[in-house]
Image (tube, rainbow, N blue to C red):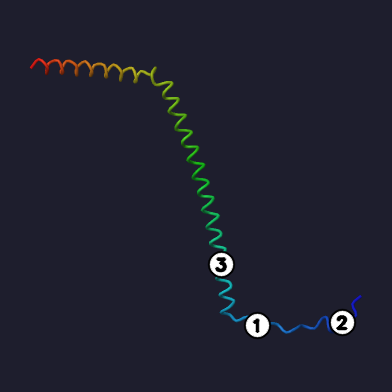
């Protein structure tokens, strides 16, 4: 057991008074430190999300292009474009021959 008397244990010791300016300074430093740490973590999360979205979007775009390459040659629009390109090439050849004759 404790040999000290109960009156000595319950006695309040002298407390240090903290000036208001020092309390405000400590609070400001603490808030600034927490805010900068929070901004650093938030920027890390934003960068991670941006990278994830970049990966997903590029994967989706490549998938779409691969699908288009597979299906485009059989589409009616693609066949029309091929026919139009052949017509234009024939017209171009005819014009080149006509210019050579002059």
* Residue at image mark 3: 31
* Residue at image mark 2: 6
x and y, in percent, of residue 70 in the image: 43, 21
x and y, in percent, of residue 75 in the image: 38, 19
Describe residue 68's horizontal placement relative to residue 14 as left or right. left
Question: Residue 17 bears which disc, if any?
Answer: 1
Question: Residue 43 bears which disc, if any?
Answer: none
| 30 in relation to 59, above or below | below
For numbered disc 2, what is the local secondary structure?
Answer: helix
Name which of mark 3 and mark 1 comes first in the sequence.
1
For numbered disc 1, what is the local secondary structure?
Answer: loop
Estimate the spatial distance between the alpha carbons at disc 2 and disc 3, rounded to whole Å.
42 Å
When asked about the image quadrant of residue 90, the answer is top left
Crowd band around label 2 with a 10 angstrom C-alpha radius: few (<14), some (14–19), many (20+)? few
At x 54%, y 66%, the residue is 32
Describe residue 7's horizontal placement relative to residue 27 as left or right. right
| 71 in relation to 19, above or below | above
Estimate the spatial distance between the alpha carbons at disc 3 and disc 1, rounded to whole Å.
22 Å
């Amino acid at each position: 057991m404790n040999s000290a008397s109960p009156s000595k244990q319950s006695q309040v010791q002298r407390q240090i008074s903290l000036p208001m300016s020092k309390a405000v300074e400590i609070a400001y430093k603490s808030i600034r430190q927490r805010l900068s740490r929070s901004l650093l973590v938030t920027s890390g999360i934003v960068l991670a999300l941006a990278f994830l979205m970049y990966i997903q979007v590029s994967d989706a775009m490549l998938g779409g292009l691969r699908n288009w390459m597979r299906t485009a040659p059989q589409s009616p629009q693609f066949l029309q474009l091929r026919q139009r390109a052949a017509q234009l090439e024939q017209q171009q050849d005819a014009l080149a021959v006509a210019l050579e004759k002059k």
